[in-house]
Amino acid sequence: MKELIFLEPVFKETIWGGDRLGKDYGYDIPSDHTGECWAISAHENGTCRIANGEFKDMLLSELFKTHREVFGGIEGEQFPLLVKIIDARDDLSIQVHPDDEYAAAHENGSLGKTECWYIIDCDEDAQIVIGHNAKDSAQVKEMIEAGKWDEFIRVIPVHKGDFFQIYPGTVHAIKRGTMILETQQSSDITYRVYDYGRLQNGKPRQLHIQQSIDVIKAPFDPASAAGENETTSFVQAGVKRLVTCKYYSVYKITVSGRTDLPNHRPFVNMSVIEGSGLIDGTPIKKGDHFIIPSGYGDFILEGDMTIIASTV
Ligand code: ZN
């Protein structure tokens, strides 16, 4: 039987980060300004190391290069997905990502970025930014150049368990008091539109006004950010499909007792976000992230836990 591949996360300190990745998840974080845990990543800006088994100590990027069979022989230069946990103690900048086409032309052939958010936890009055209120591209430009932020951005309330799909060209921002599991294309290209005038080491962080105006789509369609309709999304008891797009499918698996899951995917990313239990007898707990390799086949989950799973 093929082995599960457990990963050691990489942490990123940010001006808006907090200490919950240490407090709530027990990770050994570098400081109380730790904003991101790159939990399943082969990105050059932070690639995870393999924690167990025959590939122990290898980087995930290296494994993807040298053992493509582990990932069902999928095509591509780089491991396609990146899974993060984000602890926003403060507001993140208002930002937008390019699509593959724009990124290829303007960012040295990099991938664009489609991403999605599962709200793991948030303050009672937490909000996020998704979309804008401009009626067309001319008004996007006008509002950004005039700094009409309150008018421009679309702020909505969020609750634990909410899910949002963020396509390229969608203005967005995670706001304070929110813990999110983000599944995204493996890209790190972000255009910052507005940063609340904050300073980092005495200087404002770089903004990317022209690129943002280039890529922001108008008008914004709120339906594009919604997850799938709940009534059609139960693929089987305990499993809910959150979204399927060109780049990934994301599922929420709720285990209470025993769940048997069929699996023929090239690989599956698994992140335990609550509780603990077993996968085929191997103990797993909140904060564990692992990959089910190609050829592993069906699996059995037991215990009391919530898992966010993703695959291509
Ligand atoms: Zn983003």
Image (cartoon, helix red, strand yellow):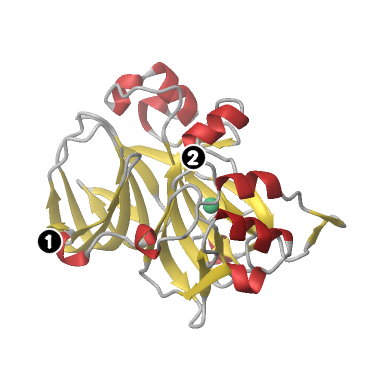
Q: Is residue 208 in view?
A: no
Asked if disc 1 is less than 8 Å from ligand 1, the answer is: no
| Mark 2 residue element | loop
Mark 1–mark 2 distance (CA, rounded to whole Å):
35 Å
Residue 300 place in picture, x, y as percent = 16, 49
Q: Which mark is residue 145?
A: none
Residue 167 place in picture, x, y as percent = 43, 50
Residue 91 place in picture, x, y as percent = 63, 67
Residue 63 place in picture, x, y as percent = 42, 24
Judging depth in this view, the residue of 30 and 264 nearest the camera is 264
For the point 31% across and 27% down, which residue is it?
A: 71
Q: Quadrant of the N terminus?
A: top left
Q: Which mark is residue 99?
A: 2
Q: Is residue 177 in view?
A: yes
Q: Residues within 10 Å of mark 2 (few under 14, many from 20)?
A: some
Q: Quadrant of the C terminus?
A: top left
Which comes before the other along the chain, label 1 or label 2?
2
Tell me the amino acid under the disc marked 1. Ala
Tell me the amino acid under the disc marked 2. Asp
| Mark 1 residue element | loop
Circles 1 and 2, Cβ within 8 Å, touching? The answer is: no
Identify whether 183 is placed above or below 305: above
Q: Is residue 304 left or right of residue 209?
A: left
For the point 41% across and 75% down, which residue is it?
A: 159
Judging depth in this view, the residue of 77 and 29 nearest the camera is 77
Identify whether 131 is placed above or below 52: below
For the point 25% across and 29% down, which residue is it?
A: 294
According to the picture, the residue beneath numbered tag 1 turns out to be 237
